[in-house]
Amino acid sequence: MKSRSGSRAASASVPSRSDRGRRSVWASLLDRPLWNDFWFTPSPAHTLAMMRILGGAMLFYTHAVWTLDLPSFLGPDAWISTELSREMNQANAPGAWSLFWYVDSPGLLWAIHIAALVIFAMLAAGLFTRTVSILAWLLTLSYCHRLQGALYGLDQVNALLATYLMIGPSGAVWSIDSLRAARREPELAGNLQARTSVGATIAVRLVQVHMCVIYFFGGISKLKGTDWWDGSALWMALSNYEYQSLDLTWLIRFPAFIALLTHVTVIWETFYCVLVWPRASRWIMLSMALLVHGGIAVAMGMPTFGLAMIIGNLAFVPAPVMRGVVEYVVRRSKEMRFGKSAAGSSLPAAASKLARCGTPG
Amino acid sequence: MSAESVERWGIGRLGRLAASSLLLLHIFAMFLSPFHFNTIPPGGNPAPDAELVMPWLRPYINFMFLNHGYAFFAPNPPAANHLMRASLDTGDDRPPTAITFPDRALHRPRLMYHRHFMLTEFLHGAYPDPLPDEPDAESRARHAEALANYFRIRASFENHLRVAYGVPAASITRVEHRMIPYDVLLRERPSLTDPRSYSDLDDVPVSPMGSGGTSQ
């Protein structure tokens, strides 16, 4: 690959041959288009903003539920006492840290919890987004490290979202921050929607890569078991009373169908990390994600986990498509409310925009 | 080139070098944790290559809450779930009150039910596997340590029950709810909550010599 920086340096001074060679190697490495295009091509923030709205709402709801029995989970005499939580983390997870390990007073615990809920609500609404996204991340980790034993996949995805929402400008659009910015400088109002940033790309890419890691290991872990091979795994899940929220045991009459769904699930999960990138197969992978996680949400008693995984999958919806879909929905709802005739682009137009988008996010 | 690359990639070469290094570190950590988890055979140790770098990245992985295997319903979905029955003794003539955790009617919304379900599975998961027939000193010591850890968790649960329900004594029994086999379900169509599918599990107390106890 020809070095772009090499030619500029040559015109400024006369470096030695070896200097030129070294610079050329470094320049060639640092200017690799594949890596740099993937991570550093500035993109609009619409995908990240949608993930902020939905992820922030999920963080708010997940933590609001603790309010119903806060002392039982986070108080000094909780199921896992504060002292035991700290000791277990020190023994098994050095490096973990929680603010709640240092809170003994019930009043302080409630104050921190209510402040946390306000912060999660502000994140969802996009108010002082940059600051609250960092606070939301710290608080999410603090809850997770304090709540050993009560956690499951939902908390892993919540922490993932909180981490990456903090990295990018998730409040750049569809936020109170952007409304305030537009009010302060009306001439910038149109530019806000079109503004691109590297931070948005990095944040969305990290969610994408992390989702691929989750599915890949989820898939290959299943390949070690016999139930995912003999086709009975889905039946085991559907007939599990403690998980069950919708009785689908009537499916016992269709063993071949259950086996087929089992095999499709594990194949989809294992190969998601490859097939979600090409445009041709991306929408099959995302549709499958919607079906699988929608099924988990409805039938397996984990609506929050199912929804959180769907929010994670939104990272693969390109920003122009996300913007097009939201604008279409807003326009349609206005038309329904005020009876105006349709104008401008349509949902099919947004969908065709998707087909042209080579770079997700 | 710098201006050109800034225009194309938003940040200059030095910025991209720094960002790329951090990204590589984070992605490696993100990958390492489930990889490490998957290399551990039942009752064994992680593969040497996974263990090689883990000590360096463990604090970061733990702090960032990346320490997961992502083995959802893997390698197989559970063949049994684990609940617990709490017995609350008021210390007077009244018989102890029994509460089962989790309870769909008691623990609402569904997320709260699931939190209690995870707690009871966590308690059961802390109970060590039975020792082999002729255990060596090391496995006997490991087993005793795991059992002591289980009893600390159980003691914390029981203390919580005493405080939460304002009773002088509370005790916990682990309850196993086994899945009804496919052929039985097809033939007899029993309820998923058929009483025959539940059984209590015993806890073997810790002895100074270690323990060779098993759960049912």
Image (cartoon, coloured by chain):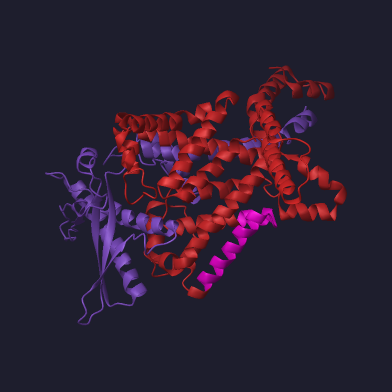
Q: Is residue A61 above or below residue B36?
A: below
Q: Residue at x 56, y 29 (%)?
A: A282
Q: Residue at x 39, y 50 (%)?
A: A245
Taking the image as shown, residue B91 lies to the left or right of residue A177, namely left
| Whole-percent x, y for residue A252 in the image | 30, 37
Taking the image as shown, residue A318 lies to the left or right of residue B139, namely right
Q: Is residue B90 above or below residue B133?
A: below
Q: How many marks?
A: 0
Q: Which chain is red?
A: A
Q: Is residue A196 magenta?
A: no
| Residue furthest out toward the right | A187
| Whole-percent x, y for residue A110 in the image | 52, 70
Viewer-proximal residue, B102 or A48?
B102
Magenta span: helix, strand or loop, mainly? Answer: helix
| Whole-percent x, y for residue A72 in the image | 41, 67
| Whole-percent x, y for residue A223 in the image | 35, 31
Q: Residue at x 56, y 70 (%)?
A: A111
Q: Which chain is purple?
A: B
Q: Residue at x 15, y 53 (%)?
A: B213
Whether residue B46 is visible, yes or no, is no
Q: Is residue A124 magenta?
A: yes
Viewer-proximal residue, A88 or A53?
A53
Bounds of the magenta span?
A108-135
- Figure quadrant of residue B172: bottom left
Give the quadrant of the N terminus of chain B. Answer: top right
- Figure quadrant of residue A324: top right
Taking the image as shown, residue A85 lies to the left or right of residue B172, namely right
Taking the image as shown, residue B75 lies to the left or right of residue A165, namely left
